[in-house]
Amino acid sequence: MDWDNLRFFLELARTGTLVSAARRLAVDHTTVARRIQALEKEVGSALFSREAGGHRLTEAGRRLQPQVEAMESAFLAVESAAPASREGLSGLVRIGATEGFGTVVLAPQLALFAQAHPKLVIDLLAMPRLVHLSRREADIVISLERPARGPVVVTKLTDYVLRLYASERYLASHKPIVEREDLRGHSFISYVDDLLFSKELQYLDELYRPDSFALRSTSILAQHQAAAAGAGIAVLPAFIAERDPSLRRVLPGEANFTRTFWMSVAAETRHLARMQATWNFLRETVEAQRELLLPADATAG
């Protein structure tokens, strides 16, 4: 039985659509369909039922999946035990991270890392939602909440600070803010409450419940742009706001929030050379920007 066909079977079982499986395998979706058809011919039964929303495992497919996963685990164990290729790192590493952190902190450095390893492909999923390690959406995930279960290796990557910011133009045209009570009547920029992907994003509840919002968005980068345009006051990560000379801190020394980034990887792949190298590089990248992520003058607010 062709192992490549089984790999295609696993990706389609995990992702549920030909397009998603093809993206993970770096092939065209027609290749995935052809491989599945070949495997179904080999086993003599349909492994998926084709539905409007994608592909769902049949009973035969559900029986086959754990057997193929066992084969995959054995293959990964052999691969991790083998000495690293003289040609350097190769293969795909997909990293999931929050939108702001992934875009501002990680993307520039990961691009350089990939340049140093031409045969290594880095996919960065920098999105305003939770990226799931358990669903194989990524190989390494950086999240706001520590994974509570599953066969994963987890480490605390870093704490980081968020503060209240507004543009110089906004502050000059509105009443001064000296204490928390002065926030009354000001316009705020924040997340859409019912679309929060983590309870760790509920900052304003700790400080002040705004009277009005100038803009709410699922994107922290959109919130930053709105604040820079003078639309209102926003809670922004220091690693984003401190790079923008148009922004000023509001209630410095008082309105600070500290959150944590956790990094996790599947236990079965953590020993692969490309995973170890990427994992270590991410830790080095964060350490190099520690002062911006966690400024020395930050105090609990």
Image (cartoon, rainbow, N blue to C red):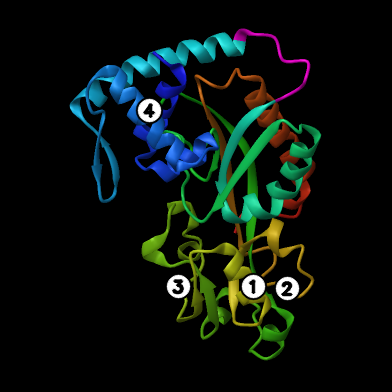
The amino acid type, in three-letter code, at marker 2 is: Leu
- Closer to the N terminus: mark 3 or mark 1? 3
> Residue 175 versus residue 191: which sits nearer the camera?
191
State the residue lying farthest toward the left. 59
Q: Which residue is mark 3?
A: 209
Q: Which residue is mark 1?
A: 225
> Residue 165 versus residue 206: which sits nearer the camera?
165
Can the viewer see residue 108 in this picture? yes
Q: Which residue is mark 4?
A: 9
As displayed, is residue 61 above or below residue 19?
A: above
Provide the secondary structure element on which disc 1 rests: helix
Q: Residues within 10 Å of mark 2 (few under 14, many from 20)?
A: many
**Residue 222, quarter of picture:** bottom right
- Closer to the N terminus: mark 1 or mark 2? 1
Foreground mark, 3 or 1, reads: 1
Can the viewer see residue 137 in this picture? no
Provide the secondary structure element on which disc 4 rests: helix
Q: Position of residue 142 (x, y in %)?
A: 56, 41
- Write the start and end of the magenta stretch as one range: 81-89
The amino acid type, in three-letter code, at marker 1 is: Gln
- Closer to the N terminus: mark 4 or mark 3? 4
**The C terminus, quarter of image:** bottom right
Residue at (50, 19) in percent of width and height: 268
Report if the CB atoms under discs 2 and 4 are less than 8 Å apart: no
Report if the CB atoms under discs 1 and 2 are less than 8 Å apart: no
The amino acid type, in three-letter code, at marker 4 is: Phe
Foreground mark, 4 or 1, reads: 4
Report if the CB atoms under discs 4 and 1 are less than 8 Å apart: no
Residue at (73, 73) in percent of width and height: 248
Q: Position of residue 108 (x, y in %)?
A: 75, 49
